Image (cartoon, rainbow, N blue to C red):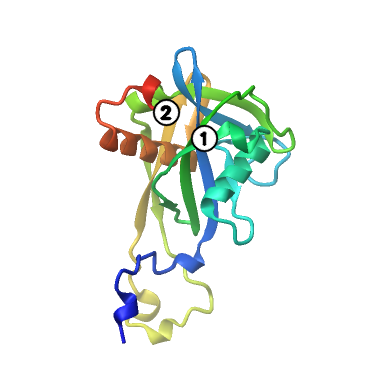
Amino acid sequence: MFETLKGRIPKSIDEDEYRKFAVMVALLKQEDGLHVVFEKRAGGLKRQPGEICLPGGARDGNESSETNAIRETMEELKVSREQIHMIAQMDTLYTAYDNKVSVYLCELTDYEMTYNKDEVAEIFTVPLKFFMETEPAAYVNTVRLLPPDNFPYEQIPGGRNYHWRDGHKKVYFYYYKDWIIWGLTAYVLRGVMRTLKAELPGIECGNLVV
C-alpha cells in the first residue's frame, strides 16, 4: 500500500503555512565584469519604502516560483522576457516571519537601467566580485515565542511557567560605497555567493554567465 511513496520528493512539513515569494539575482555585464542589479524601493510604498532590494515579490495565484521571479523582474525593471536569461534556481530561504523565498539567478541583456517608477525609486549595480570577496557584517537577533492570550497553558506541563526556548537569527549587512544592503536581501546574496564558491571552484566573475 506504500508503493506510491517510493521516490517521493520531500518538502517542508509546514510548507502550506508559508507565504510564497520569489526574488531574482540579476547579473548585468559591465566594463569591469558582472554586476548585481539592485532596486531602491519607492518612498510611497506601504511596505519597506526606501529599502534596498532585489527584483521580486509575492507569488500570484498558482504560478510557479520561476514564473513569479520572471514576472516581477519584468514589471519592476521594465524589461522583456527575452532580456532575461535564466541560469539556475538557487537555494530557498525560509524566514522567521513565515515567508518562503525562492531565489533565482539570471543574466540581463540589453538592459538600459529602466524601472517602474510606481515601485522603484532608483536602480544601481554592485560588482559581483565585491560580494564574492566580502563577508557581510553579522548581528544576532533573538527570536522569541509569544503565545496568545487564549493559549491553553493548563494543558501543558508547567503551565504558564513553561520554559520556551529562544531562537537566534543572524541579520547580515553589506556596505558598498553609500549603499547599505541588509536583511533578507543580504541573506540571499550571502547564500548565493556561498553556492557559487562551492559549486564553481576557481570562478572568475567575468566569465560566470554561460
Q: Quadrant of the C terminus?
A: top left
Query: Which residue appears farthest toward the top when viewing the image?
Result: 31
Is residue 42 toward the left or the right of residue 150 in the image?
right
Q: Do labels 2 and 1 touch, CB within 8 Å?
A: yes
Local secondary structure at mark 2: loop
- Measuring from the top left, give residue 144's x and y in whole percent: 41, 60
Could you tell me which residue is drawn at 49 percent across and 68 percent down? 16
Using the image as rendered, state which of residue 208 and residue 49 is in the foreground: 208
Q: Is residue 210 above or below residue 96?
A: above
* Label 1: which secondary element: strand
Placement of 117 over or under 29, stated as above or below = below
Residue at screen point 42% across, 50% down: 92
Quadrant (top left/top right/bottom left/bottom right) for the N terminus: bottom left
Give the spatial CA distance, label 2 vs label 1.
9 Å
Q: Nearer the viewer, residue 174 or 91?
A: 91
Q: Amino acid at mark 1?
A: His
Residue under numbered circle 2:
209
Q: Which residue position holds label 1? A: 85
Q: Position of residue 18 (x, y in %)?
A: 50, 62
Q: Residue visible at 52% across and 72% down?
A: 148
Q: What residue is shown at x 36% (from left), y 83% (from top)?
A: 156
| Whole-percent x, y for residue 41 in the image | 64, 35
Which quadrant would residue 190 be assigned to in this image? top left
Question: Is 38 in front, or is 208?
Answer: 208
Q: Report x, y in % for residue 93.
A: 42, 50
Q: Is residue 67 depicted above or below 31 in this figure?
A: below
